[in-house]
Image (cartoon, grey):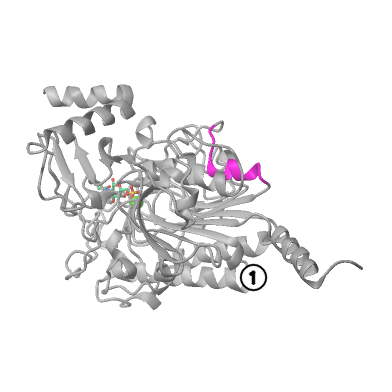
């Protein structure tokens, strides 16, 4: 009898909080989306209301990083919490590459499984499959299921690489056993058309590379034979992954779940569904970003309809910076106009300059994260330790920092420093400063027309006063250069010897 109304209410609220349990966690990962492609980061040529919603109603990070300026290394680091330059296989992989995450290695989904989570991936994988010589007509293993994902619905590598099929828990979807799949990255199968010899079959012309097997009128990287009934439809890919992501949420809404939802846009080949063709004035690249934004809106609607938005932490980011022409003539460069996918930064995909790795980065959790903007340095590398911290798990890796407070929009410091990677080259960010060691390599990747950040001398930039990395302060600030060199060498350990040897050439 003694319980007051307040006490009863208190008990009820407590009960409610307990009932809500650990949050669902969703990582929405874009492919080649630049810092400046998103409305909140300054894009006016492409409307991205749903990405903007995540930023405006959550935390928007102005110093959010992918670990690498290309896909595989960034994805490796995101899932494992290990810098990709520690793993020499973490390079852009062919579709036949073996799995590069060790089945004994810690990953975000594995860590979450120990806390009772159901874990899923729907979208782009690109971390290798099998152990070499994959037979695509049998269960393909090891793959995502063996590194922590209870459910996996993936494309093996990239939209421009064979095999051009979906794989569900290791099985090629819709495969006809009488039409087995064969894949070869060295040579063609006899009698099969290619982008070089059969240009009349192409509906999208290749600019560089992308001239091996032709699938749906698009030349791909690598040769493929068979598997006709299993081949994906490029224009339906966004809808296809969205439907599976929505189904995953509906199926697992009663347990805490982790969904890794890596979309394929705006990577090449850019194939918007007809209803998005012309959504922007920028050609296919703008149109597929509009399409991806719509998918994110639909996905958020599903979370909302299922009553999950208040109990789901969403991280939105991109695997590397932007590129216009990445191998096909698709008007993305000619129609780009004044749009700046790279935002205020120099370079782009493949580059050690900022635009390679400095990407859109938002965290959203309705009712839990108060809207705000943070200039703290955060990296996708930190998601493993930070998410572990948020769900009360004590797993940490030495590279991955627990930035839970920062990501949750509470007070707290971000990273003091970060090693940036771009196709095996590395650079060092600390505070407002970036140091790029000398690289005896071309300054520009001519096919894609992107400055790579390579120079024969040290480069040192102060991003606070020079966000576009135009004024090299290496000579005028030798003390800072020395500090940066020393710290970088310490963090990189023995890997630094390679840099020294390049320098001596
Ligand atoms: C490059 C491809 C490029 C893209 C990239 C991987 C050529 C000439 N270029 O080798 O088109 O596929 O690999 O992009 O083949 S990533 O975002 O998955 O890293
Ligand atoms: Ca990418």
Q: Residue furthest right?
A: 1
Q: Residue furthest left?
A: 475
Residue 231 in sight in this render: no
Q: Is 120 above or below relative to 247?
A: above
Q: How many marks?
A: 1
The verdict on residue 429 being magenta is no
Using the image as rendered, state which of residue 347 and residue 393 is in the foreground: 393
Q: Where is residue 297 shown, x and y percent of the image? A: 48, 72
Q: Alpha-carbon neighbours of circle 1 within 10 Å: few (<14), some, or many (≥20)?
A: few
Q: Is 204 above or below relative to 464?
A: below
Quadrant occupied by the C terminus: top left
Using the image as rendered, state which of residue 445 and residue 319 is in the foreground: 319
Query: On the rendered structure, is 116 left or right of 456?
Result: right
Residue 423 in sight in this render: yes
Residue corresponding to mark 1: 306
**Secondary structure under badge 1?**
loop
Q: Residue at x 43, y 41 (%)?
A: 76
The verdict on residue 111 being magenta is yes
Query: Does any atom of ligand 2 lie closer than 8 Å to the CB of label 1?
Result: no
Q: Where is residue 99 shown, x and y percent of the image? A: 47, 36
Q: Where is residue 462 shown, x and y percent of the image? A: 18, 47
Numbered range of the magenta stretch: 105-115
Q: Where is residue 279 shown, x and y percent of the image? A: 33, 77
Q: Residue at x 35, y 67 (%)?
A: 289
């Amino acid at each position: 009898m003694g319980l007051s109304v307040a006490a009863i209410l208190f008990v009820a609220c407590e009960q409610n909080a307990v009932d809500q349990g650990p949050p669902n966690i969703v990582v929405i990962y874009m492919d080649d989306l630049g810092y400046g492609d998103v409305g909140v980061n300054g894009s006016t040529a492409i409307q991205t209301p749903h990405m903007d919603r995540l930023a405006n109603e959550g935390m928007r990070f102005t110093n959010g990083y992918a670990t690498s300026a290309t896909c595989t290394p960034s994805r490796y680091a995101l899932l494992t919490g290990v810098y990709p330059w520690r793993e020499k296989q973490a390079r852009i992989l062919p579709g036949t590459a073996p799995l590069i995450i060790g089945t004994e290695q810690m990953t975000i989904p594995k860590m979450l499984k120990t806390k009772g989570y159901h874990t899923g991936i729907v979208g782009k994988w690109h971390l290798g499959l099998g152990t070499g010589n994959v037979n695509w007509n049998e269960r393909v293993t090891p793959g995502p299921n063996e590194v922590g994902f209870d459910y996996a619905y993936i494309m093996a590598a990239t939209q421009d690489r064979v095999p051009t099929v979906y794989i569900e828990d290791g099985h090629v979807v819709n495969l006809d056993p009488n039409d087995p799949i064969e894949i070869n990255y060295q040579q063609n199968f006899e009698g099969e058309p290619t982008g070089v010899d059969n240009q009349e079959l192409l509906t999208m012309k290749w600019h560089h590379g992308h001239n091996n097997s032709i699938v749906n009128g698009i030349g791909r990287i690598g040769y493929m034979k068979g598997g006709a009934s299993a081949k994906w439809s490029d224009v339906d890919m966004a809808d296809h992954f969205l439907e599976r992501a929505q189904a995953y949420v509906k199926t697992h809404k009663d347990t805490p779940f982790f969904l890794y939802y890596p979309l394929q846009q705006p990577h090449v080949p850019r194939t918007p569904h007809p209803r998005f063709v012309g959504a922007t004035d920028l050609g296919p690249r703008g149109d597929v970003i509009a399409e991806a934004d719509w998918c994110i809106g639909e996905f958020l609607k599903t979370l909302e309809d299922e009553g999950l938005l208040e109990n789901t932490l969403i991280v939105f980011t991109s695997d590397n910076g932007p590129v216009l022409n990445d191998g096909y003539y698709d008007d993305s460069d000619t129609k780009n106009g004044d749009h700046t996918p790279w935002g205020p930064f120099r370079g782009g995909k493949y580059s050690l300059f900022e635009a390679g790795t400095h990407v859109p980065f938002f965290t959203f959790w309705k009712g839990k994260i108060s809207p705000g903007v943070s200039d703290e340095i955060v990296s996708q590398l930190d998601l493993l330790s930070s998410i572990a911290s948020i769900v009360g798990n004590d797993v940490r890796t030495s590279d991955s920092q627990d930035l839970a407070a920062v990501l949750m929009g509470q007070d707290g410091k971000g990273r003091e420093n970060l090693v940036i990677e771009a196709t095996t080259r590395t650079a060092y960010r600390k505070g407002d400063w970036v140091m790029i060691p000398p690289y005896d390599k071309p300054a520009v990747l001519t096919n894609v027309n992107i400055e790579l950040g390579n120079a024969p001398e040290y480069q040192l930039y102060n991003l606070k006063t020079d966000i576009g990395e135009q004024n090299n302060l290496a000579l005028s600030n030798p003390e800072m250069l020395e500090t940066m060199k020393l710290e970088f060498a310490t963090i990189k350990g023995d890997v630094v010897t390679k840099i020294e040897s390049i320098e001596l050439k």
